[in-house]
Image: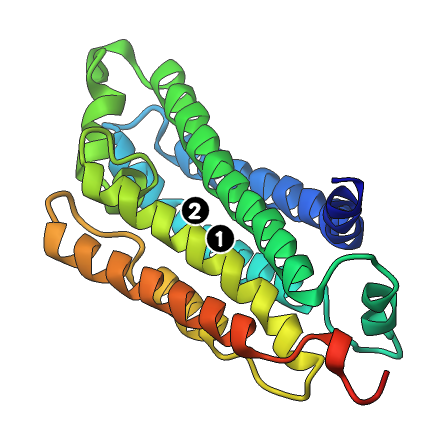
């Protein structure tokens, strides 16, 4: 078990501070954008929370931050810039496929935390809206209704829509696997395009209206299919244990 924990520690050591920094910058930028947008409407006939959320361009910042996270996690295990991480991995007492598995678990945790972070950010900003707007324009249903009316907010926290939770979970599973596979393929001189395809699907189709069951099902199947294909590719691929260069 100690050997497996050492793999997780190596994955975390490579990226954890940059991931935390990315999360912190994202939270600050999104908060400033929302607060700036909110200040512009104070004293006027205020639009709804969902409109302020859209006008603040938080969804755009989230998309950019998400792509940066994908890039950071994908390249964390690559042999680039003179780094020979491959030789470090060879010194570990577990097989390379096992290493890729644990790196995938770590990456999944990062993507889950990214999702959870934005749920918290949006909830806190929604509460800020309620406290700043004249009480005659808000009610105890204001935040709840906004999560049904705004596609981005609803996709982050789908409330009673189970299919959207399952879709998001499929994204987390697929992205964690594909980002871990990217460096595995790069160390063999190959290109891991699965993460590019899946990340593009997330950016384009993440914010969907309530009741998009067909879309949720299709995207879940695609994400799970990509995950399965990537896992099979790793399982059938060569590990460093049999690499002729070693």
**Marker disc for residue 58:** 2
Q: Name the residue rendered at 68%, 88% in the picture.
A: 189
Element type where label 2 sits in the image: helix
Q: Position of residue 141 (x, y in %)?
A: 19, 16
Provide the residue designation for mark 1. 61
Query: Residue 131 falls in which quadrant of the image?
Result: top left
Q: Name the residue rendered at 18%, 27% in the picture.
A: 145
The CA distance from mark 1 to mark 2 is 5 Å
Q: Name the residue rendered at 23%, 41% in the picture.
A: 150
Q: Name the residue rendered at 46%, 41% in the picture.
A: 115
Point out the image quarter for the N terminus.
Answer: top right
Q: Position of residue 158 (x, y in %)?
A: 25, 36
Is residue 57 visible in this depiction of the protein?
no
Observer-nearest residue: 42 or 12?
A: 12
Q: Position of residue 214 (x, y in %)?
A: 11, 56
Q: Callout 1: 10 Å neighbours few (<14), some, many (20+)?
A: some
**Contact flag, marks 1 and 2 (Cβ < 8 Å):** yes
Point out the image quarter for the C terminus.
Answer: bottom right
Element type where label 1 sits in the image: helix
């Amino acid at each position: 078990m100690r050997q497996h924990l050492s793999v997780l520690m190596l994955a975390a050591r490579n990226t954890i501070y940059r991931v935390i920094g990315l999360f912190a910058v994202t939270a600050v930028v999104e908060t400033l954008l929302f607060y700036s947008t909110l200040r512009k409407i104070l004293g006027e006939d205020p639009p709804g929370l969902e409109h302020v959320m859209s006008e603040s361009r938080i969804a755009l910042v989230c998309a950019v931050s998400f792509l940066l996270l994908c890039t950071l996690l994908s390249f964390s295990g690559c042999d680039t810039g003179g780094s020979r991480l491959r030789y470090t991995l060879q010194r570990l007492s577990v097989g390379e496929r096992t290493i890729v598995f644990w790196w995938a678990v770590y990456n999944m945790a990062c993507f889950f935390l990214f999702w959870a972070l934005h749920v918290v950010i949006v909830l806190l900003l929604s509460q800020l809206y309620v406290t700043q707007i004249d009480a005659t324009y808000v009610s105890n249903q204001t935040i709840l209704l906004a999560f049904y009316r705004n596609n981005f907010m609803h996709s982050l926290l789908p409330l009673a829509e189970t299919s959207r939770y399952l879709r998001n979970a499929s994204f987390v599973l697929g992205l964690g696997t594909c980002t871990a596979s990217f460096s595995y393929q790069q160390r063999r001189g190959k290109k891991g395009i699965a993460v590019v395809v899946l990340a593009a699907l997330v950016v384009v189709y993440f914010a969907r209206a309530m009741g998009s069951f067909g879309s949720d099902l299709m995207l879940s199947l695609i994400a799970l299919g990509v995950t399965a294909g990537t896992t099979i590719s790793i399982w059938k691929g060569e590990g460093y244990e049999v690499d002729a260069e070693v």
